[in-house]
């Protein structure tokens, strides 16, 4: 029971329940709560249907990269286990994904070193990236360490070939088809838009006010009757 509680704490806080290590923070570490939040939302939030398609595409990638006589492909069976674990663990609403290596190892019943190697393979193949993070140490004295390392923030990615495979599985339009459709929709909107519609689309309130005054001036100078009012 204590092991499960400790693992849950690691996942939710990113900090293991242990005494301060006083080990130096690793190079290129960022303060927690920064860039990873937007990256999680951008890359780690997607529907369950895409979740399943991503896993099937990864399995196909593993099969395609397996050389004759070899047991594993580029990802390896543990790499697939790690990816499957991360896909299931990601926050559905915010995309949060920051387990420790040991937590993953316990979850898939493998050694920590095997998980570290598998994560490196996933990154090398374009399936994963991460941000090293740290947090300030509360009540640290001036001559003591001011920050400590916490778990990495993992970002789920897709290599181009896998992304295309997922697109076909989900029967989504290609980027080219989507771009053409968006261009036609914009052109149709412009063709049917009125002057008021165009002014309403302007983001700046000041510019909208200026355009509205210009329109009113033009309308007053060119009344519908075609005759200007006598001065």
Image (cartoon, grey):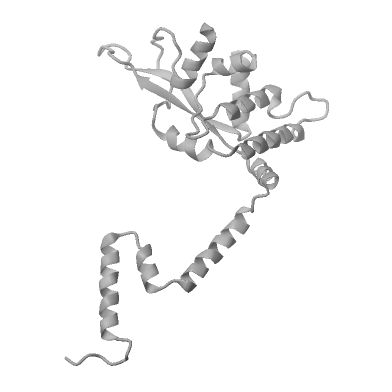
Using the rendered view, name the quadrant where residue 180 is placed: bottom right
Report which quarter residue 103 is drawn in: top right
Residue at 63% from the left image edge and 33% from the top image edge: 125
Q: Position of residue 96 (x, y in %)?
A: 49, 30
User: Split into 4 quadrants, where in the image is the N terminus?
Assistant: top right
Front residue of 224/179: it is 224
Q: Residue at x 30, y 75 (%)?
A: 215
The quarter of the picture where residue 207 lies is: bottom left
Q: Is residue 35 above or below residue 205?
A: above
For residue 192, side relative to residue 63 (left or right): left
Q: Position of residue 120 (x, y in %)?
A: 59, 25
Please report the residue visible at 25 percent of the width from the left and 79 percent of the height from the top.
217
Name the quarter where the C terminus is drawn: bottom left
Q: Is residue 59 above or below residue 198?
A: above
x, y percentage for residue 18? 43, 8
Is residue 9 depicted above or below 159 in this figure? Answer: above
Q: Residue furthest left?
A: 231
Q: Nearer the viewer, residue 158 or 84?
A: 84
């Amino acid at each position: 029971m204590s092991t499960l509680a400790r693992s849950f704490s690691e996942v939710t806080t990113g900090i293991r329940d242990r005494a301060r290590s006083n080990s130096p923070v690793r190079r290129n570490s960022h303060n927690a709560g920064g860039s990873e939040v937007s990256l999680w939302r951008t890359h780690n939030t997607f529907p369950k249907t895409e979740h399943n398609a991503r896993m099937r595409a990864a399995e196909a990638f593993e099969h395609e990269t397996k050389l004759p006589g070899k047991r594993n492909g580029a990802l390896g069976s543990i790499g697939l286990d790690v990816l499957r674990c991360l896909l299931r663990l990601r926050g559905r609403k915010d995309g949060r994904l920051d387990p420790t290596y040991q937590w993953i190892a316990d979850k898939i019943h493998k050694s920590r070193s095997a998980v570290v190697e598998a994560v490196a393979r996933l990154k090398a193949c374009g399936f994963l990236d991460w941000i090293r993070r740290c947090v300030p140490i509360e009540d640290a004295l001036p001559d003591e360490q001011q920050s400590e390392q916490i778990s990495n923030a993992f970002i789920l990615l897709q290599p181009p070939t896998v992304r295309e495979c997922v697109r076909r599985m989900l029967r989504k339009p290609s980027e080219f088809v989507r771009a053409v459709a968006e261009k036609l929709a914009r052109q149709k909107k412009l063709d049917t838009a009125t002057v008021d519609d165009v002014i309403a689309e302007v983001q700046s309130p000041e510019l909208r006010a200026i355009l509205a005054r210009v329109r009113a001036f033009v309308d007053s100078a060119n009344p519908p009757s075609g005759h200007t009012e006598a001065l």
